Image (spheres, grey):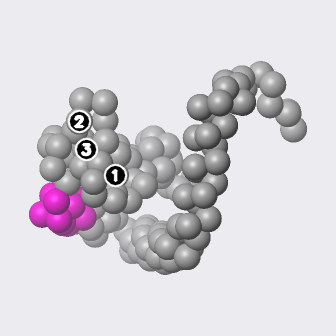
Amino acid sequence: MDDVRRPLYLQLRKDGKCRFRAPVPDDLVDAFGKKNETKSLGTTDAKDEIMNKLLEKAFAEAASRPDDEQALIASIVLEELHDEALWQQKFARDADKLDAIAAKVRGQIARGETSPFDPSDAPHE
């Protein structure tokens, strides 16, 4: 799976199996009863067939909701798809810059010019 680019909501677990994980919008947390929706795909193969089945299940679940929730879910999905397309375009445009930054950081790490991040050192707002 590492050689295949996967969306942010598709995660590879430590055991090599794929899972779907997405945040539940704040205004739907009460309806879902949780802050994140996670579903193990039960496989190490994340081909289109698996994702199509997951998408079909998600749409079937959404279709069972009241009309106002369906409209909200649809708008969230469409917004996420639009945002994902914009990010993909930005990453494609800036790939060389990102590669240069990553190479610079790898060099700094190799030369011992970095230190581990300690969250207690982070500024508090």
Q: Label 1: state its secondary structure.
A: strand
- First-in-chain label (2 vs 1): 1
Place residue 125 in its image quadrant: top right
- Residue bearing the label numbered 1: 10
Place of residue 88 in the rendered image (x, y in percent of width and height, measured from the top left): 48, 71
Q: Crowdedness of circle 2 by 10 Å Cα count: few (<14), some, many (20+)?
A: few
- Residue bearing the label numbered 2: 16
Say if mark 1 contacts mark 3, CB within 8 Å: yes
- Comparing 102 with 26, the one in front is 102
Tag 2: amino acid: Gly
Residue 48 is left or right of residue 27, and the answer is left
Residue 13 drawn in magenta: no
- First-in-chain label (1 vs 3): 1
- Is the residue 26 above or below the residue 79 in the image? above
- Residue bearing the label numbered 3: 18
- Is the residue 74 above or below the residue 20 in the image? below
Secondary structure mostly seen in magenta is: helix
Residue 56 drawn in magenta: yes
**Residue drawn at point x = 33 percent, y = 59 percent:** 5
Q: Label 2: state its secondary structure.
A: loop
For the question of whether residue 87 can be seen, the reply is no
- Comparing 45 with 82, the one in front is 45
Q: Which residues are magenta?
A: 47-57
Say if mark 2 contacts mark 1, CB within 8 Å: no
Q: Crowdedness of circle 1 by 10 Å Cα count: few (<14), some, many (20+)?
A: some
Say if mark 2 contacts mark 3, CB within 8 Å: no
- Is the residue 84 above or below the residue 105 in the image? below
Tag 3: amino acid: Cys
Q: Label 3: state its secondary structure.
A: strand
Residue 21 is left or right of residue 72, and the answer is left
